[in-house]
Image: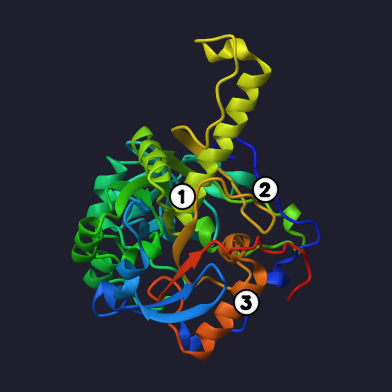
Amino acid sequence: MIAGFSQDSAAVPGLTVDDFDYVLPPELIAQAPAVERRASRLLHLDPASLLHDRQFADLPSLLRPNDLLVFNDTRVIKARLFGEKSSGGKVEILVERIVETDRALVHMRASKSPKAGARLRLSNAFDATVLGRAGDGGDLFDLRFAGPVLELLEKHGQTPLPPYITHTPDQGDDARYQTVYAREPGAIAAPTAGLHFDADMLATLKAQGVNTAFVTLHVGAGTFLPVRVQNLTEHVMHSELYTVTQETVDAINAARAAGGRVIAVGTTSVRALESAATATAKTRASVAAHPALDGTSTLPRPPATLDAQSGDTRLFITPGFTFHVIDAMVTNFHLPKSTLMMLISALAGTDAVKAAYAHAVAERYRFFSYGDAMLIERPLIAPQTSAGQA
């Protein structure tokens, strides 16, 4: 493991990956973004589980004063590098996590894996030294770079487009595979629901009394990994680093007090907020069991939804999960059988999600990172969580 922590999951026993499958014509996978960020379509799944075909530009009309939009402000780094070993063999590197100024954990493709001590020449510009294997099962390599990792990546790296986008990244991708509010470098995949927002829309939302807050979750390559087990209770979720600040906690509390909704922009914002709530519940349970740990009183602290939190998360959200923070979410369309399909099914219900995706395919929506969006509101009636509904 990258860090010491346990996985949190509430998967309904008997659920399998086949419960989250659907048929997607390949031509519906968007290979380029819309001409303008807000020019995408928006499929609205309302609280009655009814579907509405809209444009993303309609989003402000679906929000209310005192609603709170929570964005993920992670910034995509130019994480992909090409080079060669001292033997001349080719290597391809994808930086997963920067752990020191000049050191990173990376995925590596090579005809033969280099051993500790091996030197790599990257982008024909600088060297890196292999320190050893890392990650779960040794699936990552620990590299020492010949200088600050972020600076070298910015100068010599390539924007890491998802595997289903087939063209070589260019300057257009450098700009459009990045949210307009990105500020914390560390992601190797964009929080794609945020790609639809431009500065004018953010200004419009602010003017109508919709508030904004930010979390940080550095999206890793694990977001694209398939679920390799049939029984979801056996799946081990990839880890990602997240931060929920006190400022964001205060904004959530203020929205609640004013009768507003908390609307996460993207699955990564959902994971960050619900991970913070899960960590908070554990802390408060411990304090309740040992009141003196509170430090200020011999009485347990009063219940609360979440405190500011930062750390690694493996939170696996599937049907059966209890949401503590979010009321709705904006999201793109996700890969069949993916953990992200499971997350949105936990919020809206598997039947409603299947119907929405069937509708989106029939209406020729554009799918995945550069595709169209959904607004999903929590249903009025709690979704069913039985297995075998595929």
Circle 3 SS class: helix
Q: Which mark is residue 9?
A: 2
Q: Secondary structure at mark 2?
A: loop
CA neighbours of label 2 inside 10 A, class few (<14), some (14 to 19), many (20+): some
- Tell me the residue at 31%/47% (across/down): 185
Q: Residues within 10 Å of mark 3 (few under 14, many from 20)?
A: some
Q: CA distance from mark 1 to mark 2?
A: 27 Å
Q: Give the amino acid at mark 2.
A: Ser
Looking at the picture, which amino acid does disc 3 mark? Answer: Lys
Q: Nearer the viewer, mark 3 or mark 1?
A: 3
Q: Secondary structure at mark 1?
A: strand
Cα separation, mark 3 vs mark 1, equals 35 Å
Residue pictured at 58% horizontal, 84% vertical: 358
Image coordinates of residue 375 in percent, x first then y, are 45, 68
Q: Would residue 164 be visible to someone looking at this image? A: no
Left or right: 234, with 121 as reference point: right
- Which percent across, then down, holds residue 14? 81, 61
Ranked by sequence position, the earlier of labels 3 and 1 is 1
**Circle number at residue 243:** none
Numbered disc in front, either 2 or 3: 3
Separation (CA) of disc 2 from disc 3 = 22 Å
Asked if 268 appears above or below 32 in the picture, the reply is above
Residue found at x 64% / y 22%: 286
Residue annotated with mark 3: 354
x, y (%) of residue 150?
Answer: 29, 46
Residue behind mark 1: 106
Front residue of 142/267: it is: 267
Residue 204: quarter of image: bottom left
- 8 sits to left or right of 205: right
N-term-proximal mark, 2 vs 3: 2
Q: Is residue 199 above or below residue 246?
A: below
